[in-house]
Image (cartoon, rainbow, N blue to C red):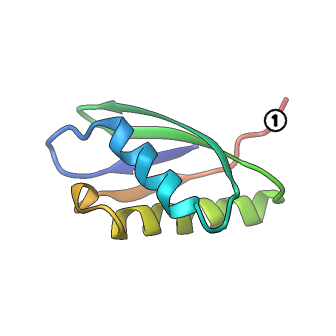
Amino acid sequence: MATYIGPQSLLDHDALVASLQQADRQRGGLEHARVHASGAGMRGVLFISGMDSDAARIYCRDLFEQAVLGAPELTGWSLAHCDVLPIA
């Protein structure tokens, strides 16, 4: 699970999902992304395949950084929290 913070203007969550998918195209570890946007920021869950917990956490951080670098509409956004959720 990840929490993103950024400018006061609300960002369309689809823009973040599309940027994450674009950043993942070459690596292919992202299976699915769910993002909820509100006035307080955005929260997302990224489903990563084929990695242990530590590798998945690093991958998610790198993926977000690449997404922000590749999308002008994400300027000013940053990753506030990233943690692995246990699979039940």
Which of 50 and 41 lies nearest the eye of the viewer? 50
Answer with the quarter of the image where residue 78 lies.
bottom left
The residue at 41%/54% (across/down) is 19
Which of 71 and 83 lies nearest the eye of the viewer? 71
Describe the element under mark 1 as helix, strand or loop. Answer: loop
Q: Amino acid at mark 1?
A: Ile
Image quarter of the C terminus: top right
Image quarter of the N terminus: top right
Q: Position of residue 61 (x, y in %)?
A: 55, 64
Q: Is residue 40 left or right of residue 54?
A: left
The residue at 56%/53% (across/down) is 82
Q: Is residue 57 left or right of residue 22?
A: right
Residue occupied by mark 1: 87
Q: Position of residue 8 (x, y in %)?
A: 15, 44
Answer with the quarter of the image where residue 70 lies.
bottom left
Q: Position of residue 77 (x, y in %)?
A: 29, 57
At label 1, counting other C-alpha atoms closer than 10 Å, the crowd grade (few under 14, some 14-19, many 20 or more) is few
Q: Is residue 85 left or right of residue 36?
A: right
